[in-house]
Image: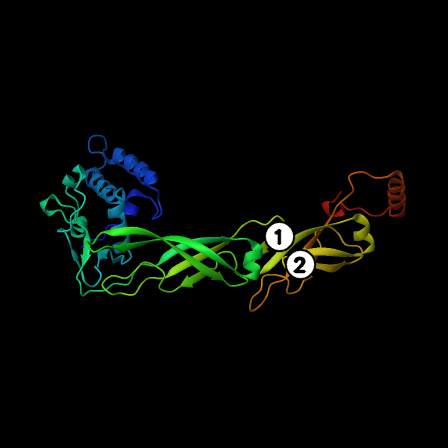
Amino acid sequence: MEFKDYYATLGVSESAAPEEIKKAYRKLARKYHPDVSKEADADEKFKDVGEAYEVLKDPEKRAEYDQLRQYGSQGGQFEPPPGWESAAHFGGGGYTHADARGFSDFFESIFGGGGGQRGGFGFRHQASMRGEDVHARLSLFLEEAFHGCEKQVQFTVHEMDEHGHVRARQKTLKVKIPQGMREGQHIRLKGQGAPGIGGGEAGDLFIEVELAPHPHFTIEGRDIFVTVPISPWEAALGATITVPTVDGRVNVKVPKGSSSGRKLRLKGKGLPGKHPGDEIAVLQIVMPEQHSEKAAELYAKLAEAEPAFNPRSKLGV
């Protein structure tokens, strides 16, 4: 039996919203309508588009298709999971007029069609199938990722009721976040995904961590970067300044003659882990908005004392 990828047929992603699916269907239906299209296979493509939309527009059909779709195709051929069988005897929700278009064997085998009843895929009582894995995202503040915390996560699982229909259910879990989590890392919670069928084990929950933007710090791997303003005299003469870290303040020595962009490495002050990151303090020389007359005089004397200094020499001017 040929496997039908309805998402690919409409050119939408698996997470596409109903409006996006509807828009894609209308566009393709106009393109391949036999009355207006001059393409040789327009009639066949028009049927394919209609079949894909018939499934993806219906939340229950789409949920059933998504659960079955995890088995994918082998060389373009669909291999049903163990214990799967057509279940056209399941009721609930009649066919629409679109079902009269003569859909594929793949559609009929999943959703049935005999007797004008809506089908559904079913499983023999003795068969078992592992529940699908569920993916969720969790946004953390940098401080929460640094120190570790406990957060609540909400997500949706699809489960099959006693009539063979797939239903969506909201779940809420309290999750312990270990310290040092980075952007894009995953936490796996075994058995917290969708329940299995016929006694099969439950799927897993995969939580992807994302970090909310911080007003001062940026992250690269396990290293934390912070821009630290310094005065011209601190840069010229050297100084000991206070620098913020996620774990508190530390004193740092600014070397004499530092320029803007110079990086000072604070070992081990990045994200915790087996190999902790560092904090990188990037110096930025900041001028006062206003100068006193005395300061202006000193700048003038400085210019006279350093006549050979050309900060634009690398530009060739």
Mark 1 highlights which residue?
217
**Residue plotted at (24% across, 65% down):** 199
Could you tell me if residue 221 is visible in this image? no
Q: Kindly indicate the quadrant of the structure image that contains residue 276.
A: bottom right
* Residue 95 placement (x, y as % from top left): 17, 41
Above or below, comparing residue 84 to residue 50 in the picture: below
Q: In this rendered view, identify the residue nearer to me: 172 or 216.
A: 172
Q: Give percent across and percent down for residue 109.
A: 16, 52
**Residue 274 is at least partly visible in this image:** yes
Q: CA distance from mark 2 to mark 1?
A: 13 Å
Query: In the figure, residue 245 lies in which quadrant?
Result: bottom right
- Give neighbour class at mark 1: few <14, some 14-19, many 20+ (Cα, 10 Å): some
Identify which amino acid the numbered label 1 is placed on.
Phe
Question: Residue 266: which quarter of the image?
Answer: bottom right
Horizontal placement of 136 versus 289: left or right? left
Secondary structure found at label 1: strand
- Dot 2 falls on a residue whose secondary structure is strand
Report the quarter where the C terminus lies: top right
Q: Which residue is disc 2 drawn over?
A: 248
Position in image of residue 115 (x %, y %): 9, 45
Q: Earlier in the sequence, mark 2 or mark 1?
A: 1
